Image: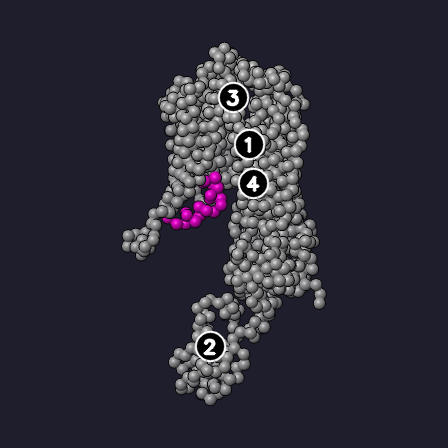
Amino acid sequence: MSTPAIATFDLGKDYGGTRALQGLDLRVEVGEVVGCLGPNGAGKTTMIRLLLGLLIPTRGRAEIFALDSRRQTVAAHRRLAYVPGEANLWPTLSGAETLRLLGRVHGTFETNYQSELIERFDFDPTKKVRSLSKGNRQKLILIAALMTRADLLILDEPTSGLDPLMEQAFRLCIHEAKDRGQSVLLSSHILSEVEALCDRIAILRTGALIEIGTMAQLRHLSALTVEATFEASVPDVVQVPGVSMVEVQGRTLRCQVRGSVEPLLGVLAHSGVLELLSREPSLEELFLSHYGAPSLESTHGAGDQ
Amino acid sequence: MLGTNSPVADAPNVTSGSSKTTIARISARKSVRAGVGWGLVFGIYVATQALTYATSYKTAASRELLVKEFAHNAGISALVGPAIRIDTVPGFTSWKCLTVLAIMGAVWGILTSTRLTRGEEDAGRWELLLAGQVTRRSAAEQALTGMGAGALALFVTTAVVVAAVGRSSKVQIGTGSALFFSLAVASGALMFLAVGSLCAQLSTSRRQAIGLASFVLGASYAIRMVADSGSTISWLQWATPLGWIEELRPLTSPQPWALAPIAAFVLVVGVATIVLAGRRDIGAGTLPDHSTITSVRRLPSTTQGLSVYLSRGTLLAWGGSIVAYGLLLGSIAKSGGKIITASPTLRADFARLGISGAEAYLSVAYLIMALTLSFVAVGQVNAARKEESNGQLENLLVRPFTRVRWLSQRIALATLVLALGGVLAGVSTWVGAVSDHADVRLLSMFDAGLNVAVPALLIFGAGVLALGVLPRTVSTVTYGLLVWFLLVEILGSVVKANHWILDLSGYHQMAAAPAVSVNWTANALMVLIALGAAGCGLFAFNRRDLQYE
């Protein structure tokens, strides 16, 4: 197997007694776009700061293109570009000066692509950072990262503060980056963004990686929603294997099915079904079922019994 | 607004109305703490000046010599005000302390007021309160009230120390006089707290506000200088806040009615601040702001260039102060030397070392230069910490740029700045001295300048060590060391202190150059300790997490 863009081995971080990240084993292949989801405090930013060598791991290690993120920081950083969720830039420098400085520190960047990005993001580089809005500062830090055409883009909520038009421009840039063979690790709370851009999705909760896979794989692991309307009475499906979260409203039944649907279909076939709908869960539903809004889990549990 | 029928108002545990005083309480807490600290420094300074005079000039003859040298010296008068009744302890104390402390108070006032108004606004903390029940006008009123408490704390603390030392049989300053004198000293702080607050309303950033207020202070000092340099234009005194303070004439011939222009000034500037605060947008200033730069300036294209560029304003201001102070010290060195000669005890002390005159005076006066360079060192290391805590450093470290390189660059820059500051101090003092035909050698001043940079480097080294090991303590460690060095040096000369305590002060280790030749061995050791501490700090910094605010 070729060298991955990102590989972590039992990567962990404690803050005092708090375990911010535990035993993370994550691989991002070259040319792959991996999304990272998780509620606030799940450890996404800690993971990214460990990858960047800004934090020192308590356990394990991380590699960027097989370069140790702690010992070979400079070599690793030459091949990556990072966008933080909040741009803390130098207020007295103008946008153009900031880009020039950050470009110089990175070493190489494409001036033509920089101009193209400035135009695409409708950014005014003559203004001092101090007078830029949050969204415009975010554009500046995005341009600074994208203009390097680095092999790996690490993006921590990169579109916070951007308007929908700029969000579109950002998506276009990521598609282009993927087409060029660049790898991307995207941490975001915007589920549609992750769904649209990512090849694989990793879900973190309380510092642990609880799921990783393509949308199809994640859906397969999750429940299917089934809605059926009957001619007469609604059959009792609570005892059917795999069925949960049963809701009955008049002659309509709603439930979720995990695993094979055959046992449920067997029951429904003899009950005079008028209408049958089934659909895969959206990313939002996946997300909620994994992070566990606690109320949802308890309903889930009740349905199982 | 919370009505009486509002469910929120009826709910238990609601501290209704507290948000209306939040800013006042925060401003009061921060400024009172600083006010007490500076009050102590002011009080101790006054006490040491009074006690040193009382013990060094015991005889009427020695005091006569002082009067002869200074009472009609226009240069000295322009610098610190006319020397009135300096043959008495209160007269001398007032002459030596009033202008100096009023200016220090004014600087404190500018820094505090801009920090507690514009600084809080720049940091985005006011926005939360202003989105609630607090209006911009009320925010300004509250901040002014809180800072008023700070000025009061400064006055009370200074007064307590001065009154206490005044009871000494050697000093004999009555409690009433001590209070009036402390009021005169504190009025500098009060007036410039108001000026700083007004400038904060006019400017778009704290930095700009400090620049503007400093200009007002500089102009005020310049006018006072002109007014004090000749009797025909002494009416100019009434055109400047620092002149009003001088016209109070505490400890010599008090003129309480000179408080009237001071009170009126504070009132007018305070009201203007409140009115402007209500009229402008949050985050904006009243003056136009140049927020657009059409051409890319050449300076900040490398990280080293960036460090220089970002601190250029501060460094230029410090450099300017060092040169100005060096020139002034040099130009009064000859007269200063004569004061020392006038004091039998001081003369004996220096005679034992085989020196006299201007160089002896400069060796004493250079403590201020050591202090100035120490402040530069403290500023440098705190700026480095701030760059880390506010997330700006992260922009560099996520690129092919190591922490070691960043901190090494900062250490190199600070070392260079301090050495350059020392050379500037020495050379400018020499130029000043030569202009007054004083017997001061360039080489010995060059050495003396570098000599005072050494303890500053020591403070910087300790600061870098703190940055590496316990980054949140950088400010406490550096300011703490500076105050420790200063206190040991000031009190050590009055009180007989244990030699271990004296030895632990960087200023005490420094040789009294240019009076005696610089102890390069001791200095080399201090530089080694400083760089060793900085090296350990660098090592630790490379092995810890980046720590944000």
Q: Give yes or no for residue B125 being in the magenta stretch.
A: yes
Q: What is the secondary structure assignment of the residue under circle 4?
A: helix
Q: In the rendered structure, the residue with mark 1 lies on which chain?
A: B
**Residue occupied by mark 4:** B382
The reply to whether callout 3 and callout 4 are in contact (CB within 8 Å) is: no
Provide residue A83's location: percent of width, then percent of height: 59, 55
Q: Are marks 4 and 2 on the same chain?
A: no
Quadrant for residue B309, please give it.
Answer: top right
Q: What is the secondary structure assignment of the residue under circle 1?
A: helix
Please name the residue shown 50% across and 16% down the image.
Answer: B57
Please name the residue shown 60% across and 70% down the image.
Answer: A214
Q: Give the magenta range.
A: B115-133
Task: Say whether disc 1 or disc 4 marks the residue closer to the N-terminus.
Answer: 4
Q: Residue furthest bottom?
A: A270
Q: Quadrant of the C terminus of chain A?
A: bottom left
Residue B226 in view here: no
Task: Say whether disc 1 or disc 3 marks the residue closer to the N-terminus.
Answer: 3
**Residue occupied by mark 3:** B79
In the rendered structure, find residue A304 and report the number of the disc placed on it: 2
> Alpha carbon of mark 2 to alpha carbon of mark 3: how far?
88 Å
Task: Decide: few, some or many residues near mark 1? Use Cα within 10 Å; few <14, some 14-19, many ≥20.
Answer: few
> Alpha carbon of mark 3 to alpha carbon of mark 4: how far?
32 Å
Q: In the rendered structure, the residue with mark 3 lies on which chain?
A: B
Q: Amino acid at mark 4?
A: Asn
The answer to whether A304 is drawn above or below residue B346 in the figure is below
Quadrant for residue B377, please give it.
Answer: top right
The reply to whether callout 1 and callout 4 are in contact (CB within 8 Å) is: no
Q: Are marks 3 and 4 on the same chain?
A: yes
> Alpha carbon of mark 1 to alpha carbon of mark 4: how far?
26 Å
